[in-house]
Image (tube, helix red, strand yellow):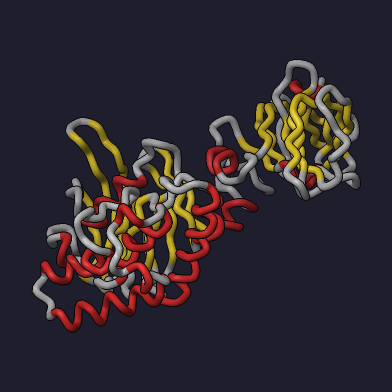
Amino acid sequence: MSDLKLVDVSKSFGAVEILKKVNLDVKAREFIVFVGPSGCGKSTLLRLIAGLEEITSGELIIGGERMNDVDPSHRGLAMVFQSYALYPHMTVEENMGFALKFAGMPKAEIRERVLAAARILNLEPLLARKPKALSGGQRQRVAIGRAIVRQPKVFLFDEPLSNLDAELRVHMRIEIAKLHRRLRVTTIYVTHDQVEAMTLADRIVVLRAGVVEQVGSPLDLYDDPANLFVAGFIGSPKMNLLPAVAVITAAGRTALRLPDLGDTLVVLPDGTPRLDEGRAVTVGIRPEQFSANGSAAFDLTIDIVEHLGGTTFLYARKDAGTAIVVEMKEGRTHKPGDAITVRFDPAALYLFDADGSRIRAGV
């Protein structure tokens, strides 16, 4: 188990800069998840750590040692890819032990390690099978087992569940969480799936266009996004984001006029940031923050209803304005075309400036 540090790590392919001075400290035994839109650099960053790509500038330090020029096989890492990359002519046992055999390890030690990993992953009954006789989930467990037998300092996962169906993804996500709790090996995991990120990570690294936008625990990022991008990216369904204009009322209170909601005026409570008259901002409110007890309200017309059993999501709007997603626990009777009134607490609103930065009290 090792800590890992990235210091001003950048990566360019010719004139194209993919990663821009990434700084990150990963603690020993921590589970870190990289998320971000396609092309943001998350898989490239993982490949730099693995040694599959060269770092253009900056430093990679693992366990206190600089690793920029160290061969991938000597970095103490094990990587699980999106594709299972199993040898079709080899059995499960042979696939899991191949890297150790290639390294010249004695047969007895290889078998001991393979059997230990197979017990952890419930693969013992499958050791004599070949990949074509395995399900997708079983193949992925073999790929993970192949990494475990190497007893690495750091596990690297590159979207390992994206080829599985929804049910298997849930199962394997739980298995990976159990595996980390059992082995307590430093883990870096790349995914585009927010549920995976929120449920697996000790901390999430949000990337956009090669830049780290925010690092924090899943709930920290959800409850306290640093900027408009993180607010809109973390959460499913995503946060509702609406244009607004600041207004100073006759009583001297700060309020927000919401053009997409028929110029609804929302007076902000004491303690929220003071905004100058006419200042353009973006207002954010999460679907679950609508409640019957809120002091502010507006009327909407439902476009789409998603019944998910215990929860219902209503997609609604005011005239031709921005669509609003409302989460309701008791929404089974609603249908498209219905008029509804939704309420919320103005203190729950997130405010963002024109440049996307978060507006906080005292700013």
Q: Is residue 246 visible?
A: no
Residue closest to the far top: 320
Residue drawn at x 44%, y 56% as measured from the top left: 33
- The answer to whether residue 40 of the structure is visible from this angle is yes
The answer to whether 353 is drawn above or below residue 10 in the figure is above
Q: Quadrant of the C terminus?
A: top right
Q: Based on the displayed image, in which of its 4 quarters is residue 256 positioned?
A: top right
Residue pictured at 11% horizontal, 67% vertical = 102
Q: Residue at x 83, y 29 (%)?
A: 335
Closer-to-camera residue (353/180): 180
Residue 241 occupies which quadrant of the picture? top right
Question: Which residue occupies 37% across, 57% down?
Answer: 134
Total marks drawn?
A: 0
- Is 14 above or below relative to 207? above
Q: Position of residue 305 (x, y in %)?
A: 76, 32
In-image side of 323 versus 52 (left or right)? right
Left or right: 6 in relation to 231: left
Q: Is residue 340 above or below residue 225?
A: above
Residue 115 vertical placement versus 170 (above, below): below
Q: Please state if 281 lies on the left or on the right of 304 as rendered.
A: left
Q: Which x, y percent locates residue 298?
A: 86, 30
Q: Position of residue 75 (x, y in %)?
A: 20, 66
Q: Is residue 299 left or right of residue 122?
A: right
State the residue in front, 7 or 80. 80
Q: Quadrant of the N terminus?
A: bottom left
Extreme residue toward the left, this view? 104
Image coordinates for residue 336, horizontal then vertical, percent = 81, 25
Q: Nearer the viewer, residue 32 or 261?
A: 32
